[in-house]
């Protein structure tokens, strides 16, 4: 068995190929990993080739290596454990799942503070997304800890845009269009320009596109490419709406029950996965665009000035409402972010 695993991985780092790594994990699992002292399951609602599921494999492989395979994390992408992203918070808190990788915006119902990373047009670059994370991280940690969970790491999606059946260059092009959003921020912003937003879990998006339940999707090029959206929505309009985060969180009682050495191994592996995802996201858009074109899609990058103005105004309204809900916490975070980035 060891020789077979060596053959699979001899010519490339394990985390460079999610499919290969997943195969290795499956082989190790079938062998029983007899020497493993701890085994954990990690839930992710997104596909194995998504940036975050790949990062989960990096985390699992780094942890297995550091612990001498005494700590084994099995990654379950594509919602294969039966949990949608909206289920992860309760599942991890209650111990039904050991670890989960969850879009922060799906935690907005737990605390609106989690919606900060998906605030429309607040973050304009990967560097700014990282600054916002560092400012928000202490509050993420506090909220999770208060709910029996441990913050491990967070990293962004590529910038969100609009997948649609026709080009979108103005608010008028979205009037009455049934468009999937991923959180209340997007729902409010798109309602403000007279679209007909519907908040859906990721697993429900393609079925709704296929049956006509929705006609457009607010998400990254990454998300649409991984699910072959071009079969239903040919156009992707680049608007750099947000670079929302995913947060990887673990049941705190389980984490606290580990030795200090094991806890350090987990946090070190989390840092490795985080660094990989932040580095990967920089060039991910170019790769996604290339695949999108290969699949027959069309990317709209020009003539969207009117749309951006309308959406930005709607974003200002969303931010104002969010600040009211989060009070001093939100005000302090936004003020610090603007001070660090030079935004007004």
Image (cartoon, rainbow, N blue to C red):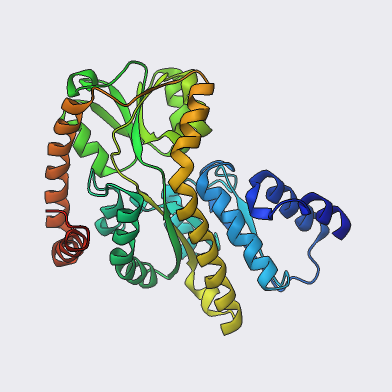
Question: 28 or 196: which is nearer to us?
Answer: 28
All told, the count of numbered labels is: 0
From this view, report whether residue 317 is shown above or below residue 155.
Answer: above
Asked whether the viewer can see residue 20, the reply is: yes
Left or right: where does residue 122 sit relative to residue 284?
Answer: left
Image quarter in which the N terminus is found: bottom right
**Residue 202 at x, y = what percent?**
44, 38
Left or right: where does residue 15 sit relative to residue 24?
Answer: left
From this view, report whether residue 79 is shown above or below residue 196.
Answer: below
From this view, report whether residue 153 is shown above or below residue 286.
Answer: below
**Residue 300 at x, y = what percent?**
33, 23
Question: 265 or 201: which is nearer to us?
Answer: 265
- In the current view of this chain or complex, which residue is farthest to the top? 166
Q: Quadrant of residue 269?
A: bottom right
Q: Quadrant of residue 260?
A: bottom right
Please tell me which residue is depicted at 27% across the width and 30% down the height of the picture. Answer: 197
Please tell me which residue is depicted at 72% across the width and 54% down the height of the picture. Answer: 25
Left or right: where does residue 17 sit relative to residue 209?
Answer: right
**Residue 64 at x, y = what percent?**
68, 66
């Amino acid at each position: 068995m060891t020789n077979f695993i060596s053959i699979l991985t001899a010519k490339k780092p394990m985390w460079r190929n999610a499919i290969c790594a997943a195969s290795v994990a499956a082989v190790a699992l079938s062998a029983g990993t007899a020497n493993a002292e701890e085994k954990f399951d990690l839930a992710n609602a997104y596909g194995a080739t998504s940036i975050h599921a790949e990062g989960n494999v990096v985390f699992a492989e780094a942890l297995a290596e550091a612990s001498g395979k005494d700590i084994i994390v099995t990654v379950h992408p594509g919602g294969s454990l039966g949990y949608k992203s909206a289920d992860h918070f309760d599942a991890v808190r209650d111990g039904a799942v050991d670890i989960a990788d969850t879009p922060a915006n799906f935690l907005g119902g737990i605390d609106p503070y989690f919606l900060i990373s998906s605030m429309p047009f607040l973050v304009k670059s990967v560097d700014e997304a990282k600054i916002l994370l560092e400012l928000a991280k202490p509050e993420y940690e506090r909220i999770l800890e208060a709910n029996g969970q441990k913050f491990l790491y967070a990293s962004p999606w590529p910038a969100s845009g609009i997948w649609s059946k026709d080009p979108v260059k103005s608010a008028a092009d979205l009037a009455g269009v049934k468009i999937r959003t991923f959180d209340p921020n997007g729902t409010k912003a798109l309602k403000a320009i007279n679209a007909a937003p519907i908040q859906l879990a990721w697993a429900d998006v393609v079925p709704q596109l296929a049956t006509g339940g929705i006609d457009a999707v607010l998400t990254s090029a990454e998300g649409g490419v991984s699910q072959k959206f071009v079969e239903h929505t040919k156009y992707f309009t680049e608007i750099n709406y947000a670079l929302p985060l995913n947060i990887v969180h673990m049941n705190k009682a389980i984490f606290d029950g580990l030795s200090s050495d094991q806890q350090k191994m987990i946090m070190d592996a989390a840092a490795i996965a985080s660094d990989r995802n932040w580095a990967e996201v920089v060039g991910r858009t170019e790769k996604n665009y290339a695949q999108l074109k290969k699949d027959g899609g069309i990317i709209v990058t020009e003539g969207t000035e009117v749309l951006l103005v309308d959406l930005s105004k709607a974003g200002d309204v969303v931010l104002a409402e969010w600040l009211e809900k989060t009070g001093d916490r939100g005000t302090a975070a936004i003020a610090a972010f603007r001070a660090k980035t030079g935004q007004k």
